[in-house]
Image (tube, rainbow, N blue to C red):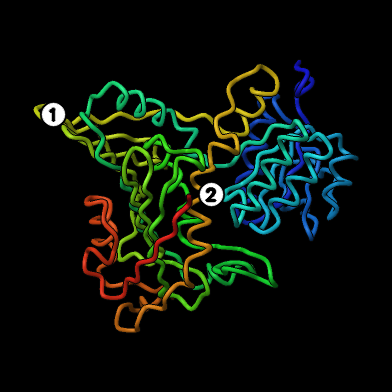
Amino acid sequence: MSALGGPLPLPVVLAGARGHGRQHLENIRRLQDKGLVRLAGICELTPLTQEELGRDQLPEQSTDFGALLESTGAVIAVICTPIPTHTDLALTAAERGVHLLLEKPPAPSYAEFRRMADGVAAAGVVCQIGFQSLGSHAVPAIREFLAKGALGPVLGVGAAGAWARDEAYYRRAPWAGRRRLNGAEVIDGVLTNPLAHAVATALALDGATRAEDVERVETELARANDIESDDTSCVRVTTGTGPVTVAATLCAERPGEPYVLVHGGSGRITFWYKQDRVLVQRSGRGPREIEYGRTDLLENLVEHLTGGAELLVPPDSTGAFMKVVEAIRLAPDPAALPKGAWDLVPGENRRVVHGIDALVTAAAENLALYSELGAPWALPNEVSTR
């Protein structure tokens, strides 16, 4: 038992149980089987059916998030709803003393992020931001390795993500692929949502996690799809320790695993963050591959509330990421790629940008932007954060 959490299992309300929210539902079931939590309620616009819930008993369901938190006596709320709703729902929970697992990105703008983070802090509740890659045991291991100087001086950090999404991906919800909707900020771009983990993980390995660690952000945002936001982009973040360059696309020729690449004076580390797999290459030594475990973020939140475990991803540890989101928000709207730059893959209904896989790889390897690598369609833009 804990003054913060109360006795196990802790009652949990899930806001947003369809789409990506199904992963949270499955994870709550896993922790329920371990006796750590209990699914007390689900907040959805349309209630889940018994068929959707499967073996679970139907929990209390409501479209009124605040009322549901109160009626269920929830200790934790998991919020997996559209990006523009994150701040208000988080504050609704905080006002009722309910702790949070808030899906990434935490907010569509830095101002909304600060409103959320400051409100949560003032309410005295705990908030975990859902960057699951930061639960990987590889992250502290790599940071300790670098702190010991095992790679020599760190020259910079690159990250690469080449994924594929068909056109239906952008039709799955009204906010998908939008920068704004009905006057509200959304900023659902490749670097701020689907491959946001690449940005957050690269910044974490650089040691730049707080907002004040970011000095400058350069952006190049483009789109091959018929959307408002970006699907093929890169950023270079100047921090107090070095450049962090992240290149990503949802229009890959051959989709692959995203990774972060740490460049050192005497070697390099490649971290495939979805697989918790690390490759260490050092001058004069053979390559060494290591697989790490991972701590689930909801389980870590429960352990924090009931046993005092260190919270892995509190809001302020994502401040640097939110500065990148803000730079992308303030950048000019993404440029539409000329038709000669992409093709529609027959039978797959997805667009592929010519040569993008090599560009993404080269950006991470050289800490360079697309325009510096010769992409004729790239339009540089810079936002100072100080």
Query: Which percent across, then down, holds residue 340?
Result: 29, 83
State the mark number for residue 322.
2
Q: Which residue in the structure is indicated by mark 1?
A: 286
* Element type at mark 2: helix
State the mark number for residue 166.
none
Residue at 57 percent of width and 37 percent of height: 316
* Element type at mark 1: loop
* Residue extending farthest bottom: 339
Give the total of numbered labels. 2
Front-most of 108 and 1? 108
Is residue 13 left or right of 376 when viewed as pictured? right
Is residue 315 left or right of 223 when viewed as pictured? right
Q: Is residue 332 above or below residue 131?
A: below
Disc 2 versus disc 1: nearer the observer:
2
Q: Amino acid at mark 2?
A: Met
Query: Which percent across, then down, holds residue 190?
Result: 46, 60
Residue at 35 percent of width and 71 percent of height: 379
Label 2 to label 1, Cα distance in Å? 38 Å
* Residue 193 is at least partly visible in this image: no
* Residue 379 is at least partly visible in this image: yes
Q: Amino acid at mark 1?
A: Gly
Q: Tell me which corner region of the image, top left, top right, bottom left or bottom right, holds residue 178.
A: bottom right
**Which of pointers 2 and 1 lies earlier in the amino acid sequence?**
1
Q: Label 1 neighbourhood size at 10 Å, few (<14), some (14-19), many (20+)?
A: few
Q: Is residue 44 above or below residue 310?
A: below
